[in-house]
Amino acid sequence: MKRPVTVRIELAHVLAELAGGAEVVEVEAGTVGEALAALTARHPALAPLVWRAGAFNDQLVAFVGRDDVRRLQGLATPLRPGDRLMLITAVEG
């Protein structure tokens, strides 16, 4: 198990509204999946948007820095100290 680090999660506007207006949330996590679980535990209103049938909602896109986690290791993508995780909706408009 990877040791948890502090990670900043930046939320798209619609997601920030469900997080009480927080555009940035800091969590302790070792992987992207752990970070998203910590985010939704802290802001339960986000859970139905982040998770669908127990899996990451494909209507959202997560980036670690500039890298789409789908091109990395998905939710198992390890996080390093200072990493920035950005969560946006896949389709805007």
Image (cartoon, rainbow, N blue to C red):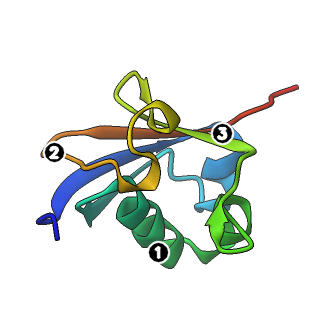
Q: Residue at x 50, y 44 (%)?
A: 23
Mark 1 Cα shell of 10 Å, populated few (<14), some (14-19), many (≥20): some
Q: Would you say the residues marked 1 and 3 are in contact, meaning their CB atoms lie under 8 Å apart? A: no
Q: Position of residue 50 (x, y in %)?
A: 64, 60
Q: Position of residue 83 (x, y in %)?
A: 24, 39
The quadrant of the picture occupied by the C terminus is top right
- Real-space Cα separation, disc 2 to disc 3, in angstroms: 25 Å
The tag on residue 42 is: 1
Q: Position of residue 24 (x, y in %)?
A: 42, 46
Q: Which mark is residue 22?
A: none
Image-based side of 49 in relation to 21, left or right: right
Q: Marks 2 and 1: CB-CB under 8 Å?
A: no
Q: How many marks?
A: 3
Q: CA distance from mark 1 to mark 3?
A: 17 Å
Q: Hey, what amino acid is under mark 1?
A: Arg
Nearer the N terminus, badge 2 or badge 1? 1
Q: Secondary structure at mark 3?
A: helix
Mark linked to residue 80: 2
Which residue is at the front of the view, 51 or 28? Answer: 51
Q: Circle 3 sits on which residue?
A: 13
What separation in Å lies between label 2 and label 1 (alpha carbons)? 21 Å
